[in-house]
Image: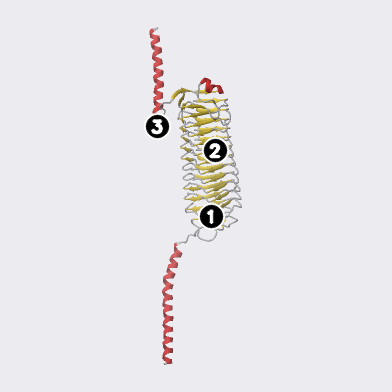
């Protein structure tokens, strides 16, 4: 019996020692110098499971009463789960806030589903690399997710589904295997001021989420797309930075959307519009992209205006054979497709490369004179190029030669005329005398 008891105690000590080693390892990995909030003074809790309103108070004793003015507060916890979700909240109608927590779980860091609209606020939390998903929200409309850090989560940093009218703002998501932020079936969602980088696929994805706003995000250095809008019409993608991705911004099957004031540089492709009619692409900067600055495929009645297209290895703007009745004007083309015959191409039909009302076209850095010819099977031209035409060096040489040869001739002729006139005046004077 004594040997048996000693063996049990030894096993318990070994397990406890192993658990402490795990905790110590996580504490070192998530230390403040790595850009993550300190976990010192956090209360360790193994999972949080709430599946009714009563659990907030009766099971866990969280402060608050669940009203909008006095929500339940879940804060300052180190939430740990070796086999499941860090925190699960479902079937609730009460307002609650999760803040200042560090979550390390085997599956979802935080899983919220089937809760009342507008009751969820998640702010200032860190979701570590152990999570499959950092934050997962399902059927929780009008949620607020702000100022969270999601690092190296396997699937996505933040995933919203069937949760329209939500706000996803000021979060930092990086290193996910799939997308940093995925929003699906969530109309009228606002995604703003997020930093999404080094994800294996995309920075921000919106699927089936019409009338949404994607603004002021930095989605750079991702393996796939910076921002991907799919079947999400009437949306706005503005003031974003999407550099060093496979593609900067792609809009597909999303009618009547706006792509404005974005910077898409050093991607394979800057901005791509696919099968999306009536898109406005304005005031974007697309430079140093490999294939093209802006590309349209199967997209009609789009307006491309006031964009800067510079130093793209391929064309500044390209339209394929299924892109018709588009309007392209007041764009600035600088040194795109160097060595080629044009800085743009057009394989579509009835595309106008100038404003039909003001009769003003585009600014081409290689324009010499007359209409500017566009590459492609359509035979399109910019009838009214803007800016100052480029003058070749040899006309300048000829002009200088003419100046230096004609001017002395004119001076000599003028001198001869003066001398002749003077001789006539002198002869007249002599005859009079």
Residue pointed to by mark 1: 362
Task: Sort mark 3 into few (<14), some (14-19) or many (20+) by Cα contacts within 10 Å.
Answer: few
Q: Is residue 266 above or below residue 207?
A: below
Q: Is residue 239 above or below residue 427?
A: above
Residue corresponding to mark 3 = 32
Q: Nearer the viewer, mark 1 or mark 3?
A: 3
Residue that protrudes farthest toward the front in the picture: 69
Residue 249 visible:
yes
Q: Residue at x 40, y 10 (%)?
A: 5
Label of residue 190 in the image: 2
State yes or no: discs 1 and 3 in contact (Cβ < 8 Å).
no
Quarter that holds the N terminus: top left
What label does residue 61 carry, if any?
A: none
Name the secondary structure under disc 1: loop
Q: Position of residue 105 (x, y in %)?
A: 47, 26
Q: Residue at x 43, y 65 (%)?
A: 397
Q: Would residue 429 be found to the left or right of residue 145 on screen? A: left
- Left or right: 35 with respect to 121? left
């Amino acid at each position: 019996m004594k040997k048996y008891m000693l063996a049990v105690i030894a096993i318990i000590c070994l397990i406890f020692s192993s658990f402490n080693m795990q905790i110590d390892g996580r504490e070192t990995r998530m230390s403040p110098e790595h850009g993550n909030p300190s976990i010192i003074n956090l209360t360790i809790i193994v999972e949080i499971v709430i599946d009714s309103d009563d659990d907030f108070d009766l099971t866990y004793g969280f402060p608050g009463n669940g009203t909008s003015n006095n929500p339940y507060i879940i804060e300052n916890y180190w939430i740990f789960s070796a086999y499941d979700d860090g925190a699960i909240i479902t079937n609730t109608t009460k307002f609650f806030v999760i803040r200042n927590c560090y979550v390390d779980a085997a599956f979802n860091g935080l899983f919220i589903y089937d809760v009342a609209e507008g009751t969820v606020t998640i702010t200032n939390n860190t979701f570590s690399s152990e999570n499959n998903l950092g934050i997962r929200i399902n059927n929780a409309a009008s949620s607020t997710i702000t100022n969270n850090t999601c690092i190296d989560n396997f699937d996505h940093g933040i995933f919203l589904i069937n949760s329209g009218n939500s706000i996803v703002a000021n979060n930092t998501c990086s290193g996910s295997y799939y997308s940093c932020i995925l929003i699906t079936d969530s109309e009228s969602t606002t995604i703003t001021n997020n930093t999404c980088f080094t994800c294996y696929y995309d920075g921000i994805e919106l699927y089936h989420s019409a009338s949404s706003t994607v603004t002021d995000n930095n989605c750079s250095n991702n393996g796939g797309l910076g921002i991907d809008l799919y079947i999400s019409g009437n949306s706005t993608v503005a003031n974003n930075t999407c550099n060093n991705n496979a593609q900067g911004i792609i809009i597909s099957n999303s009618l009547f959307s706006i792509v404005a004031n974005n910077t898409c540089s050093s991607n394979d492709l800057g901005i791509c519009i696919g099968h999306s009619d009536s898109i406005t692409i304005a005031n974007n900067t697309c430079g140093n992209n490999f294939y093209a600055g802006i590309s349209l495929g199967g997209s009609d009645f789009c307006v491309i205006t006031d964009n800067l297209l510079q130093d793209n290895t391929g064309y500044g703007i390209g339209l394929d054979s299924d892109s018709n009745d588009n309007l392209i004007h007041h764009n600035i083309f600088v040194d795109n497709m160097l060595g080629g015959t044009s800085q743009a191409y057009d394989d579509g039909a009835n595309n106008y490369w100038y404003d039909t009302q003001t009769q003003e076209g585009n600014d081409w850095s290689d324009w010499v004179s007359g209409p500017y010819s566009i590459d492609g099977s359509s035979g399109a031209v910019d009838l009214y190029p803007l800016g100052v035409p480029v003058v070749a060096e040899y006309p300048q040489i000829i002009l200088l030669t003419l100046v230096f040869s004609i001017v002395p001739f004119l001076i000599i002729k003028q001198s001869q005329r003066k001398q002749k006139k003077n001789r006539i005046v002198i002869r007249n004077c002599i005859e009079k005398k």
